[in-house]
Amino acid sequence: MVIAATPDISFLIPAYNADDTLAECLASLQKQTRSNWQAVVVDDGSTDRTWEILDDIAKADSRILPARQANAGAAAARNHAARLAAAPLLCMLDADDWLDPTFIESMQPVAEDASPPVIAYCAYRRVAPDGRLMRVEQAPVLTGDAAKREFSSFCALAIHTVVFPKSLFERLKGMDETLQTGEDWDLWLRMAFAGAEFRRVDQCLAFYRMKAGSLSGDPIKMVRDAVRVTVKAQALKVQQGLSVEGPETGWFTPALSQLRMLAWVVSAKVDPTTDVAALAALLPEMPDAAGYESFLVDVIMHGLQTGLFSDRSDDLLDALDKWQPTFLSLLQLIQRHSFPGTSRKIIETTCWLLSAANPLRSFTLGNVQVVSVELGKLSRIPKAVEADTLIMHAFSGGQHVGSFVGPFWGDLSIRAQLRLIIHEMHVEEHLQTPPALAYVSSWTREALKGYRAFGGLVLKSGRRRGRLERLLVRIGRNAVLATAPSDKHDNDIRLSGILRKLEHELSPQIPEPTGSRPKERREIPAIQSEEAYWDHIFEHPDPWNYVSVYEQVKYEQTLSLIPEGIEKALELACAEGIFTRKLAPKVARLTATDISQRAIDRAVARCRDDRNVELRVLDFVRQDLPPEQDLIVCSEVLYYMKDEEMLAAACRKMAAALKPNGCLVTAHAHIRRDEPDRTGFDWGNPFGVGTIKRIFAEQVGLALEETIETGLYAIHRFRKGPAADPVLRIERHGTPLETEVAKHVIWGPAGVERELAWTTEVTSSVPILMYHGITEEGPAALRRFRTSPEIFRKQMQFLRRQGYYTLTAQTLANLLRSGKPIQGRPVMLTFDDAYLDFRANAFPILAENDFNAEVFVVTDKVGGRSDWDCAYGEPAALMSWPDIQDLHKKGISFGSHLASHTAASAMDNQALLAEAMSSRNTLRSRLGAPVESIALPYGSTDFRVPGILALAGYGIGFTTRPEKATLSDNLFALPRLEVRGDRPLEAFPELMGLPGAFIG
């Protein structure tokens, strides 16, 4: 007889009618590599030979402590066992399960009766009734709040994989005996919220015996008890302030957790007679499952494999007729409470997983038909009545060579299959050329159609040989298609009929898109001299808009620095004399000069009434200046010196031309290249006011006397005389800024120059930002979809400061198709729904930051309101066609947001095709320009949608998948990063991959 010492670990084993498995369970303990254990076995009112077997084994091994009780359930039996346990560590083992011989050796050193208590857990395997070992099931990492999060949603641990301190079990008052199922889940949940630390042992050390029919009687109990545990979890979360829920946090709502259990139970039962509605009635509420489709597929697949005792997808397909009815009933229930298209996505994902596991199998599940074809043995494949989506796998000699996923219209004749193989999968090289006379005849006809192409292909170079080879390949393809059999129910023939019908219905005359004709380019004459260059600049009057508020305020500030009593003044670079007229009354005599004769001619006309003004052409860099000046004014021109040496020479010349005690007044802008750590202009000049001020200050005899400093420029007065303490005045520049001025301003501290990024950086991904409204006003429930204009301005200034430039949809499509790395820092700005606030608020901010944008229009709603949001409050106003047309002329691009703002996944194939074509045609007609882009309302897409959008004539499509677009993305399912209005401003740099960068 084995004698027991004080044990290190006690196993709590409830046994009810376990006479066929108990001995094997206890034997697994007796085989442990460490022998200092105890097993407390409680016979829970068994009616078979369980007690006799237990008593016999216990008599031979004192480490096994037998106990009996009237039948009260597994939880009560485990609590009873725990009271009898002598060890500081516990593990709960069911009488039909067993453990690996190294279980104690591996687990005991990890668990600790400490503060906080430490719980050890490991992986396990299910064992089918026929003894087959299923795949290893590894629990998630449960460190930190992960344990609370996971146990709030489901039972992440199998009961016999966990070793925990007895003191913690007692402190929590053991298991909840009112639960008939999920009592272990409830215990792990309470342990997690009690602060226990969970540590994973990465070994498979436990085995769970599955019994046929073991789930047949308890689905109601499992769903009912899951509701109780998740409700308790919600209370604990609120109590500890952890009630944040949503896909981005990993926390599920109680309703979603309860749906998770419902889906698993229904799937695991594998019974076509299961009353899904009755089980669902146990849930307090049904959640919207949109966004959780892949997650639910994983739950359902696990349930099916559990119920069918299978690890192989083939086993699921063999039993498809058995589980499909209940599966579809479950999805109908989910769809009634979820966003349109949710159930479709679950079916598609399930089919893809089943098909990917064995692409040789053909089957139909719901609306998806999966077919596998051998290229050497093609035969006609009828379309399943309910199918609208096709997954087709092509094999050559048993080797998988390609797949097609898209909309399904009719039967797959051999010709239809060949078209998919040649034009969609591009694996025609695996086809066998038919030797039949019909093929030879067809090849000849196709060759004669292209005979003109042969004329230019003389075999003199590799390039021409390549063209000939491509022509022969095309002829061969067409010949193969022409000889292949088809019929009136063929997929392609049905689609052609649908397209002809829609084109007829949508056939109002559409004007030739103006964007398709190249614009005439005005040639700029070659510049022969500095004078000619500046004459070209002044080809049109006031090229820098000197009459703007911004310039007029600068003029007034400059005049405020002009001393009284000036006798003789010289103005350099007077341009057309706008400032000259303002300066003339403040001086006795004024000589105003400019390098451009054209500018001087306009200045003469403007100043004809100013008798004290002399105007003349002067190149102050190369020519001498009139001497003995009391005042020299030289503003907004010294940027154009090619280097500091030239600038210093000009400054010396000006200083020499001043009388003693004379003044020099100069105004120039801050330029980022010159002063990278402050707000300034991104002009390409070599320097700005920072360097200009320094060079003037270095001139012998010149001293800075007074400065007016603004955010964008500075005005200085130097005096030819002894130095004095300079006066600094901080003032504001004039507002509003003209767009042509504003778009060159980079606000804030150091960033990245666009030009530098263009020449030094390449990328394979593009952030596509998704906005909706740019406004403060709207329903509280839609706050995430509104960005305030002030926040939007700071975001655009951030992008500008960081060197980003915007792409249009067409440019992005071309770049992604090329497959080549993209230069610089591209970004695409998109705006869904075409709200009226885009014109009022967004467009001016975009323009002042030199950005373009793509706006997606709900074409049937233009000029109306966003009635799809009416459930949340007053719908927002949308732009009218005149608004859209005017913005289009100003450079804003427009794409489709469908015609009715309906989710694409909620429409059948023909309805979606019709709406996509109608919306595109409307935009083309209204704008007179090509329309290539579409953003799907709600981001709703599925396996059919990209193919249907291509048929409708689009070239690029956008969803709401939250990632950057990459070169490998499907052009009709590009992801976008949502810029949420309910997030702090600091979240924007993080969204752009620049966390911590200055914004604001």
Image (tube, rainbow, N blue to C red):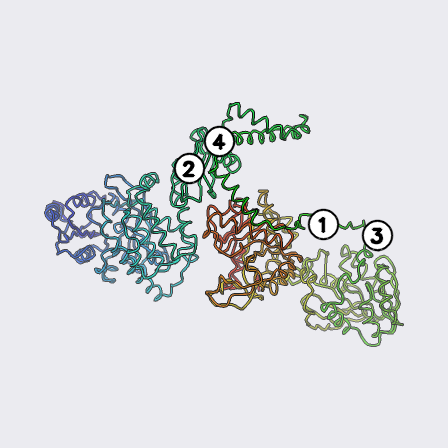
Instruction: Give the mark nearer the N terminus: 1 vs 3.
Output: 1
Apparent side of residue 980 relative to residue 18 in the rendered image (left or right): right
Q: Position of residue 247 (x, y in %)?
A: 42, 56
Question: Tag 2, which secondary structure?
Answer: loop
Q: Which residue is mark 3?
A: 529
Q: Could you say where residue 74 lies in the image, as x and y percent from the top left?
A: 19, 54
**What amino acid is at disc 4?**
Pro
Please report the residue visible at 39 percent of the width from the left and 54 percent of the height from the top: 335
- Going from N to C along the chain, the mark reached first, 2 or 4, is 2
Q: Which residue is mark 2?
A: 382
Is the residue under label 2 in contact with that under label 1 (CB below 8 Å)?
Answer: no
Residue placed at 16% from the left, 47% from the top? 18
- Residue 29 lies left or right of residue 859; in this view the side is left
> Marks 4 and 1, Cα distance to the nearest angstrom?
48 Å
- Give me the disc on residue 519: 1
For the residues bearing labels 1 and 3, Cβ distance under 8 angstroms: no
- Residue 176 visible in the snapshot: yes
State which mark lies toward you, 2 or 3.
2
**Can residue 352 be seen?**
no
Separation of residues labelled 1 and 2 (CA atoms)? 51 Å
Q: For the residues carrying marks 1 and 3, which lies nearer the camera in this image?
A: 1
| Front residue of 280 and 729 | 280
- Amino acid, disc 3: Ser
State which quadrant residue 231 falls in: bottom left
Query: Sequence order check: which comes first, mark 4 or mark 3?
Result: 4
The span from disc 2 to disc 3 (Cα, nearest Å) is 77 Å
The residue carrying pointer 4 sits among few (fewer than 14), some (14 to 19) or many (20 or more) residues within 10 Å by Cα, namely few
Identify the secondary structure beneath mark 1.
Answer: loop
Residue marked by disc 4: 485
